[in-house]
Structures are given as structure tokens and as C-alpha cells.
Amino acid sequence: MAAGLSAAITPKPFRSFLSSHLEPKPTPLFHPLLRLQKTLYGARRKRSFAVCFVLEEQKQSAPQIVNLAEEGSEDARDSQILIQARLAEKLARKRSERFTYLVAAVMSSFGITSMAVMAVYYRFSWQMEGGEVPLSEMFGTFALSVGAAVGMEFWARWAHRALWHASLWHMHESHHRPREGPFELNDVFAIINAVPAIALLSYGFFNKGLVPGLCFGAGLGITVFGMAYMFVHDGLVHKRFPVGPIANVPYFRKIAAAHQLHHSDKFNGVPYGLFLGPKEVEEVGGLEELEKEINRRIKSSMGERHGLVFLFEENMGQRSRIRDNDLGTESPQSQFTNIV
């Protein structure tokens, strides 16, 4: 933009005035003539001086366009570096959280499994010390182990709907929000469910008879269910630690997809159970949504599997993209979308 200065002189309309010091005083005889003379003599033209500013738009030169392009490329480069730094920080934090929870899960699982195996071995070895094998007691122990594991699924479904999403929502709510750190308040429920299992195992281990054998089996079934729940729910569904090849088991994929529908609240919270969650979804007519979620999780797992390669390729192609977008054809927001 350039400013121009122009000046103009414009005349104003005629304006009459009287000059009393140059004219003779009027007499009664020539008064009309003198009045006309005053009018003609007194009519003068005034001139005014006006100044105008004119703004002129000029085309930008080629060096200015190059400078703007360089500034745009620098802004794009800075935003790209900032986005990559945030992604790297988020990835490192997720890895740290997963590793911390993995250590806790492995230690607890190894400890519980070892104690359960030793308890079963020593208990049955003590039962057979007299030479007579207590078949009824052994059958009751194994039967209660399976029954307690299956019964825990129905107990968890009822407690999830009637307690965790009702009076205990202030604790369970942490599980439906983005997690900050390796643990959440909802993990307290795992400890609460472990208390009756430990009590039943202890009573059945230190006592002989049919009733202690049934209690021992019930405690063992609760323990097995808790371990399976941790690996499937925390590891497979919410990816708090890697679970290995069980993620490729078709039914486990259905379980994970069904539980993800619970978090999406598409069917009023259904399913509330875990291992029988696909059955609950089928009962409310959500098979189509279940299949969509399964396919989405498969694509997501494939993307995470190749995530490091994708980030590497993204970093290698950073400069070429910036050179192609020197004129600002691609915004930082679109670049962020491409990275994510």
C-alpha cells in the first residue's frame, strides 16, 4: 500500500458582504442605486484549499513473496517439530506406564500362581498320607473351582451394573476416564475381590474334610477368574501391558470388542460382563456393531504394530513435505492429522 498526496483549490459560492469604509453614506435620493452598487461591489468569490490523501495498492514484489514463503515454511517446520516432540513424549509416557503395570501384573500373577500350585499340591498330599484317597473331597474341590470361576462372571456382571455404576460410581468412574499414570482407583476392586479368595483358600488349606475342600476349591476358582480377568480386561482390552498371542484368538477379540462397546455406551452400558459379553450384545441386537468394533480393533492393532516404522517414515519425509508446502498450501493442523 502507498499513500499519495494531492491538493486542489475549489471555489466557494458567491457571498455578499458590505464594506462600509469604502462607500459613501447613502442619501435619500440615490439610496436605491447605492444599494445595487453595494450588492455588486460586495459580491466576492472566496477560494478554499483542500488536501486529499489517496491510498494506492501496489503489487508485492517477488522477494517479498519469497520471504513470506520462507516464514511459512519456518512456521510449518516449528509446528512439525512441536507435534513430533509431543508424540514422542506421549509414547514414552505410555511405555513407562505399561512397563510399570506389567511388572506389577507379572509379580502378582507369578506369586499367586506359585502359592496356588503349592497349596493344591500340599493339600492333596496331606489328604493321601493315610493311604486312602478322599475322592469325594477331591471331586468337590475341582467342581467348586470350575463353579466359582463361572459364578464370578455372573457376580461381576451384577456387581458391575448394580454397584459399580450406581453407589460405587465414584470409584469406578476412574476406569471410564483417561488414565493418568499406571494405576487407577478402580484397581481397588481387584483387591476387594481377592480378600474372600484368600480367606477361602486359607480355611481349606489348613483344615481337612469335605467342607474345607469345597472352600478351597471356591477360593481357587475365584483366583483363576481374577487372573484371567486381569490378562483379558487390563491387558487385551485396555492394553495396559502386552498379552502376546492371545490377542489373536478370535473369541478373545470378540470379548475385547464387546467390552469396548460397554465403554462407548451404545447399548445403555451393555455388556456388563466380560467373558460372556458377546452374548449380552447379541441379546440386545448389537451384532453389527460388534463386528464393526472387531474390524476397527484389528486395524488399530496393525497400526500400533507398525507404529515405530510409521513414525520413522514420517520423520524422514518431514523435509520433503515442508519443501512441497513452502507456499502454505497445507496447514499445521492437516499435518498433525496426517501424523496421528
Image: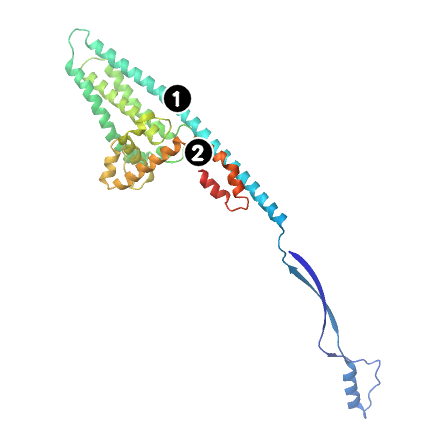
Quadrant of the rendered image containing residue 237: top left
Other-residue count near label 1 (Cα within 10 Å), few / some / many at <14 / 14–19 / ≥20:
few
Q: Quadrant of the N terminus?
A: bottom right
Instruction: Work out whether 41 lies above or below 72.
Output: below
**Front one among 18 and 306:** 306
**Front one among 293 and 317:** 317
The residue wearing badge 1 is: 103
What amino acid does circle 1 point to? Val
Q: Position of residue 179 (x, y in %)?
A: 41, 32
Number of disc labels: 2
User: Residue 310: which numbered mark, if any?
Assistant: 2
User: Residue 303: which numbered mark, if any?
Assistant: none
N-terminal of the two: label 2 or label 1? 1
Q: Nearer the viewer, mark 2 or mark 1?
A: 2
Quadrant of the rendered image containing residue 73: top right
Q: Does residue 112 appear to the left or right of 279 in the view shown?
A: right
Q: Position of residue 243 (x, y in %)?
A: 34, 26
Q: Does residue 165 appear to the left or right of 5 in the view shown?
A: left
Mark 2 to mark 1: distance in Å? 28 Å
Residue 32 in view: yes
Colour convention of the picture: rainbow
What amino acid does circle 2 point to? Phe
Q: Say which element carries label 1.
A: helix
Residue extending farthest bottom: 29
